[in-house]
Image (cartoon, grey):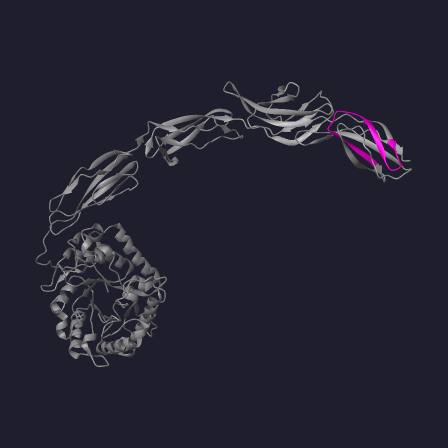
């Protein structure tokens, strides 16, 4: 099918009678017009036709003169060997209209089908002998006219009204295809284009949309309309000087790439043909952008073998700038934008074409942009305005930064410094009626800021844990905190106790280097809940401290109320100490501090207190008195916290009770008379930590109750 062109705003005008063809301002279509389209390299022509107002009666009989005129225009192109797309165009009514030809919802479905099948039955009969160069298109942009859903639906989750319309459109397409096939002749194998909702990309990919079942193999084509990028192609009046409405850039290319790849993945890759039956770009004194757009769009058309058909309504200077889809001057059959048409043919690889320029096509002048082309700034500098201007009657200037991490630029050319580096700002003077577009490249180099007053805030003392110490730091320039992404942080002398150094070397937006010292201290030893003792010794324990060179042990003197050095242990791996030559039954308190030698200094840890006691001396029982039901052992006092008295019963010693440190006897009651019992006693000491140290049992004594 190659490149396509649309005879817009002619046979699709919604008037009555043969005069409706010119009612929208276009001249009557001639063979010369169609020949000009063919000679320019177009191989497909889409002829939109509105039929409703050319029908009569309840059976919608098409006026024979109108049918003959449509056939005459079809033959202009058909005789040139072109592919012709014929459709039902502006007959999608508003649900509020007095006369409704068709409306795609379930409420109007049956009445709509009567119109659609009747009209298509007559069209099919008229053209059934034409070969496959004639293609039928069931509907044009079927949609819920006059509603909020008219032009946009969510393809993944259409609302109830949209879902109903999609289902109704499926029915319309199916009934029309069945009607065409049943008419016989070449219609049994004719290619038929079937749109989804509004003929949009969303409609063609919406949940629920499906192609009809068909008796012919692979003869149904998905029909899609794609005026993209939208702002450039159909932008409204108020914004036509804005770059997004007049220029074709990378974002527009990405948008088109997405459309074609989506259609390819959804249909073409599965053997289902697609035709972009309408696409176009309104004229806004921007033919350079239109050339770029046409070249890229039709390049994708060739790449994906998806035919694209260009909307042409012959409107050049209409008040509605979004509708100036002007290409062929139908009065003289010359082209108002020959370079745009040539770009299409170049993209499609079409040669030997004739594209005569319209009489008022004037070669535009070249405009230049003058101003400063190089700026050097420092991170932290204030925003500045570019010095750029074009000729007095030149196009509007727009600006784009190549790297917005370095600088951004607004629509007025005001530049904001964002980071160190180099960026290129492209200044574009847009095309207008007199001048071609022009560009100037401005280089902005942003140097890193030298931080002369930056400081590392005081670093708290760090406790050595056996591996390199790497504390977090806070860096400030005045009141501003400099984030860690702006510097590299290194340490020296940080794998031992002593003085270490943190060094910040700035990078990215800043430069310079600062350092701060911090202390690495010893961990305070931790006590272990383990103590052993004899009557003359205590054995205390602690956890070894990483980095320690030794420990100093202090014993508390309760008489002088002072701590006195008990021992200095010169090994960092030692974790216990035995204190000897002590008195039995005494409580003791110790402190243990770690030390380390570094940089010619001695560093001390905090102290841990450890409590212990010596075991009390062996108790000596002096005598045991007895009554009928009790006995009382009497012993010699010894230094302790208390006594435990045991009695032998049933061959086993059990605790009869405890006595205080001041007691020297204990009465055991509830015994049997005239019975011999054995008793023994031992002293115990409880240290300040609550641990108990048991002395040796006395020699057992026997006594008989009376």
Q: Nearer the viewer, residue 79 or 359?
A: 359
Check residue 637 for magenta coloring. Answer: yes
Q: Going by the picture, which residue comes out furthest to the left? A: 359
Q: Quadrant of residue 691?
A: top right
Q: Quadrant of residue 329?
A: bottom left
Quadrant, the N terminus: bottom left
Q: Decide whether the magenta segment is chiefly helix, strand or loop.
A: strand
Find the magenta span and give its range.
625-647
Q: Nearer the viewer, residue 452 or 218?
A: 452
Q: How many marks?
A: 0
Check residue 28 for magenta coloring. Answer: no
Image location (x, y in percent) of residue 482: 36, 34
Quadrant, the C terminus: top right
Image location (x, y in percent) of residue 204: 32, 64
**Residue 442 visible in the shown view:** yes
Judge whether 429 appears above or below 221 on screen: above
Image location (x, y in percent) of residue 217: 33, 71
Image location (x, y in percent) of residue 113: 29, 76
Residue at left 34%, top 27%?
453
Judge whether 619 appears above or below 423 on screen: above
**Residue 177 visible in the shown view:** no
Residue at left 64%, top 18%?
560
Q: Nearer the viewer, residue 300 or 16?
A: 16
């Amino acid at each position: 099918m190659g490149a396509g062109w649309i005879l817009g705003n002619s046979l699709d005008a919604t008037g009555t009678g043969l005069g409706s063809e010119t009612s929208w301002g276009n001249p009557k279509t001639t063979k010369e017009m169609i020949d000009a389209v063919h000679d320019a390299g177009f191989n497909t022509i889409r002829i939109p036709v509105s039929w409703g107002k050319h029908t009569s009666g309840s059976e919608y009989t098409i006026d024979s003169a109108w049918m003959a005129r449509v056939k005459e225009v079809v033959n202009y192109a058909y005789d040139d060997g072109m592919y012709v797309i014929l459709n039902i165009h502006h007959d999608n009514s508003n649900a509020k209209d007095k006369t409704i030809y068709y409306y795609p919802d379930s409420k109007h479905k049956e009445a709509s089908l009567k119109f659609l099948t009747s009209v298509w039955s007559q069209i099919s009969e008229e053209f059934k002998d034409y070969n496959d160069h004639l293609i039928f298109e069931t509907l044009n942009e079927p949609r819920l006219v006059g509603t909020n859903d008219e032009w946009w639906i969510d393809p993944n989750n259409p609302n109830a009204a949209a879902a109903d319309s999609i289902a109704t459109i499926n029915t319309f397409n199916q009934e029309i295809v069945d009607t065409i096939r049943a008419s016989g002749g070449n219609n049994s194998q004719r290619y038929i284009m079937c749109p989804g909702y509004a003929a949009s990309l969303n409609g063609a990919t919406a949940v629920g949309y499906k192609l009809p079942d068909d008796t012919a193999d692979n003869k149904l084509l998905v029909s899609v309309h794609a005026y993209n990028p939208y702002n450039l192609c159909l932008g409204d009046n108020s914004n036509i000087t804005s770059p997004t409405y007049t220029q074709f850039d990378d974002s527009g290319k990405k948008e088109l790439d997405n459309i074609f790849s989506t259609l390819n993945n959804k249909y073409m890759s599965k053997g289902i043909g697609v035709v972009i039956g309408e696409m176009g770009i309104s004229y806004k004194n921007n033919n350079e952008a239109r050339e770029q757009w046409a070249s890229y769009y039709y390049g994708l058309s060739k790449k994906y073998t998806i035919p694209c058909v260009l909307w042409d309504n012959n409107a050049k200077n209409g008040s509605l700038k979004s509708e100036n889809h002007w290409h062929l001057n139908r009065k003289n059959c010359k082209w108002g934008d020959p370079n745009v048409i040539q770009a299409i043919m170049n993209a499609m690889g079409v040669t030997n074409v004739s594209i005569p320029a319209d009489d008022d096509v004037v070669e535009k002048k070249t405009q230049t942009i003058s101003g400063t082309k190089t700026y050097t700034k420092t991170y932290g500098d204030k925003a500045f305005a570019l010095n750029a201007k074009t000729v007095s009657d030149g196009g509007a200037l727009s600006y784009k930064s190549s790297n917005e991490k370095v600088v951004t630029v607004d629509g007025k050319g005001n530049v904001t410094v964002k980071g160190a580096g180099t960026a290129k700002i492209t200044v574009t003077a847009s095309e207008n009626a007199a001048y071609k577009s022009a560009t100037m490249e401005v280089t902005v180099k942003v140097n890193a800021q030298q931080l002369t007053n930056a400081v590392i805030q005081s670093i708290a003392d760090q406790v050595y844990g056996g591996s390199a110490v790497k504390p977090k730091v806070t860096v400030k320039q005045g009141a501003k905190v400099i984030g860690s992404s702006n510097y590299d942080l290194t340490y020296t002398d940080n794998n031992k106790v002593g003085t270490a150094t943190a060094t910040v070397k700035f990078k990215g937006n800043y430069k310079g280097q600062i350092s701060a010292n911090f202390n690495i201290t010893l961990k305070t030893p931790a006590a272990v809940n383990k103590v052993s003792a004899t009557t003359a010794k205590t054995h205390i324990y602690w956890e070894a401290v990483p980095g320690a060179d030794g420990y100093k042990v202090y014993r508390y003197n309760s008489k002088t109320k002072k701590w006195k050095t008990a021992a200095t242990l010169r090994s960092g791996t030692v974790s216990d100490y035995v204190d000897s030559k002590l008195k039995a039954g005494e409580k003791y308190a110790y402190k243990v501090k770690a030390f380390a030698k570094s940089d010619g200094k001695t560093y001390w840890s905090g102290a841990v207190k450890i409590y212990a006691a010596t075991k009390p001396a062996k108790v000596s029982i002096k005598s045991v008195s007895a009554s009928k039901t009790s006995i009382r052992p009497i012993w010699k006092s010894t230094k302790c916290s208390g006594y435990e008295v045991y009695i032998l019963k049933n061959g086993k010693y059990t605790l009869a009770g405890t006595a205080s440190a001041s007691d020297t006897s204990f009465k055991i009651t509830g015994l049997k008379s005239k019975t011999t019992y054995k008793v023994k006693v031992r002293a115990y000491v409880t240290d300040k930590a609550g641990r108990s140290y048991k002395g040796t049992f006395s020699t057992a004594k026997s006594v008989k109750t009376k």
